[in-house]
Amino acid sequence: MAQTDRFHIELALGDWLYTLAIGMALGLLVASLLLPARTGKARRIAPGAVAFSGLAVLAAIALLAYDAGPFTVVVFTIKPYLSAVADAGLLFLALVLGVGGSASLVVGTRRLARGSLALVPAIAICALAVAFLLWRVDAYSTRNFGRHPKGTDASALVAAKPVITGLAVPTGVTVAENGDIAVVELTSAMFRLFTPDGDGYRQVIAVRLPIPEDRLAFHVALHPEYPAQPYVYVTSETGPLENRTLQVLRARLDRSEVRFTPIIEGLPAAKVEEGGNHFGAAITFCKGFLFVTTGDTEGTRAFTSPFDNPEVHRDEAQDLSSARGKILRWRLDGIEIVPDGVTGVAIPIFAFGFRNPFGITCDRDTGNPVVVDNGNRGHDQVRAVAPGSNHEWPISLERNLFREPLFDSGEVHIAPTGVAYRSSDTGGHEFIVSAFQSQAIYLLPVLESGAPGPLRLLIEVEGGAYGVTANSRGCTYFATADSIWRLEDGRCQE
């Protein structure tokens, strides 16, 4: 069971050291006000020189783009609502130590030594200390960690061919074994079905989902026995704007009439107007089960007012009484679904502790789902999901205390949007990952032993990739802002 009343504070060591450096620079400004007044021209300009030095050091810090340095876990257990207090308190302590340290050094030196030149070594020591702290957190390298994760193999790029064009932000895309491609558009909430037609594809169904005009549609999955069972399942928002929820719709793909009806309702949805953008909403079938992901749905105010606002849900990814930040499971019974969680609670939870699992696929070797979970400060991950597993958000930023992810982007933010399973020519299998921020399609090999191999860049995608899908014949498709493309890597056997 999740521990909803306990929380381990995790503080970025880089944050603490950077704050200490700022405190030391501010300490020089404080020292300029505390220096004893003395006669003589050189002695009168000493406070101004110290103040100028403080401003110069602050300017140097401001010009260096700070990145989060190495991480450490401060091991003490407190209540969840105190987590922000502890975090802020530790940073305030760093600021106080920095101000007190540099101010005491300068003022003490002036009191003990004769002549204004005696201040030069004290200022130099403060500047060197700040430089060391900034070096320790790699501030000199700026925020530009590179477009792709460290160690990505970009030696063998592949081509791609557009097969469907004229779309509007197709975040949902899936390919059936017979070659049909189902698409859901994010803002227009259009569902489209395309069928192979010679060298291209022909649209055979285009219908808008029955949701309000300003609601979003996300992902799509075809029945695992499609086209013998011609059913499609779609995730979308619904309900009034101020209290909208996530739902799963189902429709029979009858070309004369397609009616979508809700089969799952009341799941948590992110509120964009509050800064929430952790939609989750990914959907897939795996070994006779339907899996649906939910984001933690926290908005910006979860970080700005976490103490008395009842709508803040920062920690609910760890709460088994909440559907936020979860992978949910239903057993497929024909075309109907039956709740089938593994945690013994009313919500059909399969796994928990996710931030924003925006893509999901089925690992055909294990029968379990694999998700791409968008992290904080980088740490975008590909995670294999076992029944009842805890994936640590928001307990851990790196989310590797209980089990290692198959892949972690480290300090680089790639914003993964989708993942697809594909067999491998060399044994084992591989996952194809689409990414929006890094604008790329990647291949992550998994050896027969289950160990992941090095990440490989397949193709860079202008404007970012919105989703990816593959069938058992190795045909792999990905979505851009207005098109569906097929990888031309020699794997597709039409």
Image (cartoon, rainbow, N blue to C red):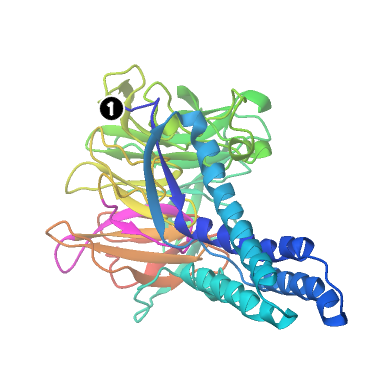
Q: Quadrant of the N terminus?
A: top left
Q: State left or right for residue 268 relative to residue 319.
A: right
- Residue 38: x, y in percent? 83, 71
Q: Quadrant of the C terminus?
A: bottom left
Residue shown at 40% from the left, 62% from the top: 410
Q: Is residue 53 above or below residue 190?
A: below
- Residue 214: x, y in percent? 68, 35
Q: Is residue 22 above or below residue 238?
A: below
Question: Residue 58 colored magenta?
Answer: no
Residue at the extreme left:
449
Compare residues 277 and 363 and report the one nearer the observer. 277
Q: Is residue 490 above or below residue 163?
A: below
Residue shown at 45% from the left, 57% from the top: 13
Residue shown at 57% from the left, 38% from the top: 207
Compare residues 458 and 407 and report the one nearer the observer. 407
| Prevailing SS of the magenta stretch | loop
Compare residues 129 and 269 and report the one nearer the observer. 129
- Residue 272: x, y in percent? 64, 39
Q: Amino acid at mark 1?
A: Leu
Name the residue beneath numbered marker 1. Answer: 332
Q: State left or right for residue 73 relative to residue 462.
A: left
- Residue 356: x, y in percent? 46, 43
Q: Secondary structure at mark 1?
A: strand
Q: Is residue 5 visible?
A: yes
Q: Is residue 323 above or below residue 179?
A: above
Residue shown at 58% from the left, 36% from the top: 302
**Residue 63 placement: quadrant:** bottom right
**Residue 389 placement: quadrant:** top left
Magenta stretch in the rendered image: 404-428
Question: Residue 415 colored magenta?
Answer: yes
